[in-house]
Amino acid sequence: GGLDELDAHLIRCRACPRLVAWREEAGRTRRAAFRDWQYWAKPVPGFGPPDAALAVIGLAPAAHGANRTGRMFTGDASGDFLFAALHAVGLASRPGATHRGDGLELYGVRITAPVHCAPPQNKPTPDERTTCRPWLAKELELLAPSLKAVVALGAFGWQTLLPVLQDTGRPLPRPRPAFAHGAHLVLPGPGDGPPLHVLGSYHPSQRNTFTGRLTSAMLIDLLTRAASLAGL
Ligand code: SF4
């Protein structure tokens, strides 16, 4: 089966009791601004074409962001910041998401996460990260024929992604490379396959964007570099 089939299985996953409860609770309580929304409240699949050359990988959906919209990295300020940058680089059809039928498309990029359900305080437990790992490993295996580069957003995203890449047959250097904005790893294989470029980027969280730790110019630069490594 392909990515559609994987996603169809993923959205029925209930393997993490704490996260199942949290994602559904957020859908019941809602935020005043989203009173009229029917929350997605299920695992959020990757968003973007099945033959993407670049993957952008966060950590987990936000309770009132992607857990509400059902589209990875949409519906919150971080997502708006990321999509504005993707659009500036020519990788997204619009600078942000508005509603489910808004025609938002990604070109050559798939946005996904190593944990597919919204966690309390945006912090999955180590067990939850381990439990969700095979979903991303499978997704990356299905993308492997076209995938040339990956951007990991934030230190947690980076630390959670690297073991998943190892699971897909790409040995990691030792010691395990540390996260930094602009960190660049080139991982061989699997087999005789082409190498995969892995770039680290500060997460577009409000903590980073409000303080100017991550500016739009910095994110646009980094995505431009990633797109070029991916041949986009
Ligand atoms: Fe399933 Fe992953 Fe959600 Fe856990 S986080 S319930 S493994 S989809």
Image (cartoon, rainbow, N blue to C red):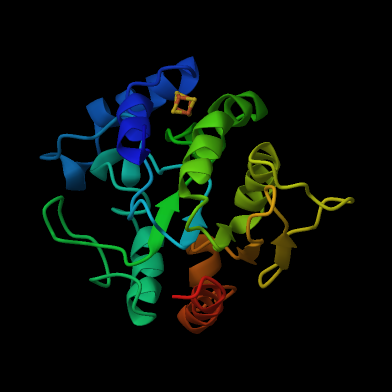
Quarter residue 200 falls in? bottom right
Q: How many marks?
A: 0
Q: Residue furthest right?
A: 175
Please tell me whether residue 27 is drawn above or below residue 51 in the rendered image: above
Residue at figure coordinates x 27%, y 41% from the top left: 70
| Residue 11 located left or right of residue 164 | left
Q: Which residue is painted at 24% across and 26% down in the image?
A: 28
Residue at point 15%, 50% (across, down): 100
Is residue 49 visible from the viewing direction of this image? Answer: yes
Place of residue 146 in the rendered image (x, y in percent of width and height, measured from the top left): 47, 58
| Above or below 220: residue 197 | above
**To which quarter of the image does residue 186 belong?**
bottom right
Q: Is residue 58 above or below residue 119?
A: below
Residue at point 78% right, 49% down?
172
Q: Is residue 43 in sight in this rendering?
A: no
- The answer to which of 165 and 114 lies nearer the viewer is 165
Residue 93 shown left or right of residue 229 in the figure: left
Where's residue 147, x and y in %? 51, 58
Quarter that holds the C terminus: bottom left
Which image quarter holds the N terminus? top left
Q: Where is residue 223 drawn, in percent x and y?
A: 50, 74
Quarter of the image where one finds residue 226: bottom right
State the residue lying farthest toward the front.
Answer: 192
